[in-house]
Amino acid sequence: MIPQAKFSKTLNHQGFQVVPDYHMHTPRCNHATGDIRAYAQAACDAGLSEIGMSDHSPMPHGFDKAWRMDESELSSFIAEVQAAQVEFKGQLSIKSALEVDFYPGAEPYIQHLAAQHNWDYLMGSVHFIGDWGFDNPDEVAKFESCDLEQVYCDYFDVLGQSAATGLFDVIGHPDLIKKFGYVLEQPSSRVEAAEDAMLAAVKAADVVLEISSAGLRKPVAEMYPREGLVEKAAALHIPFTYGSDAHSPAEVGFAMDDCLSVLLKYGIKEVATFRQRKRTMMPLKVITG
Ligand SMILES: [Zn+2]
Ligand SMILES: [Zn+2]
């Protein structure tokens, strides 16, 4: 059956199949709408056969607590995912996952989280440099007074550290630092070197990068990561997952075709899927004729 969602028409036009959307949230993070059922139904309506519920994980010591579930909610979150898995069985595969914040020092807590459940995958994301929540609209002013080149270098350094911990299966939205449009006109040699060091850490840890359509909905109006970074990752044979970072059911599968086009442009012909933290590659089947 031909999927009805608007993006899927383009998908068919370009000849790609739909792939799993591995990044979506629930109201438990306090900044998303729609329950898990609604995300699952939206995925089915769009013709997807697999999604991952990857809400913002709890973090210790009240870290950024307004933007995530509390640890006391973790078991309810897991139960809701399991209930949806039963309800949509045969229609939609629903992976149980978390988007976990990484900052140096969080490792023991992340190990604790990993042991709480038989997760399908854990996505590591960097939203903070030190105590600066650089993707928080309330903290955007800091970009005006910072050394942008240094900020980019610091960001990629923390992102590389997140991969090197070996605690994550996927690294989320790998150049989120550009979200508000504070972008260097041309990545400087220092920033290129910081990107390369991050990619080397990702490769050494055998971790996957996410290509995310969320940036297209933000001031930067670009997917994460930038094409030049996809190109470098492709040269290293680093695998990708696709994620919409949906914070409402309507965003499920957002701009999937654009993301897959970029992967294909750089010779990436498969995406990673996970089951109980084991990776399997799914080919992008190009439908001809
Ligand atoms: Zn969020
Ligand atoms: Zn995120």
Image (cartoon, rainbow, N blue to C red):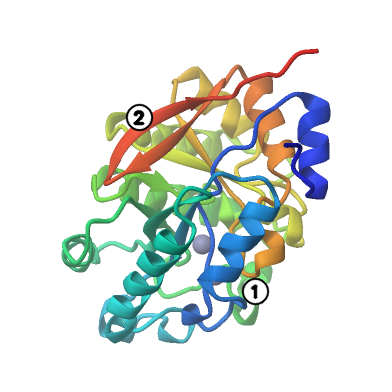
Q: CA distance from mark 2 to mark 1?
A: 31 Å
The one nearer the camera, 277 or 87, is: 87
Task: Say which residue label 1 marks.
Answer: 140
- Looking at the image, which residue is at 66% across and 60% down? 42
Question: From the viewer's perspective, is the residue at label 2 or at label 1 nearer?
Answer: 2
Kind of residue indicated by mark 2: Lys
Q: Is residue 198 visible?
A: no
What crowding class fits label 1: few (fewer than 14 Cα within 10 Å), some (14-19), or many (20 or more)? some
Q: Is residue 202 visible?
A: yes
Left or right, 1 with respect to 73, comes to: right
- Looking at the image, which residue is at 44% across and 53% down? 89
Q: Earlier in the sequence, mark 2 or mark 1?
A: 1
Vertical side of 87 occupied by 160: above or below: above
Task: Say which residue label 2 marks.
Answer: 203
What crowding class fits label 2: few (fewer than 14 Cα within 10 Å), some (14-19), or many (20 or more)? many
The x and y percentages for residue 278 are 28, 38
The one nearer the camera, 12 or 101, is: 12
The x and y percentages for residue 182 are 70, 58
The x and y percentages for residue 277 are 28, 44
The one nearer the camera, 80 or 229, is: 80
Image quadrant in which the N terminus is located: top right
Quadrant of the image occupied by residue 9: top right
The x and y percentages for residue 190 are 52, 38
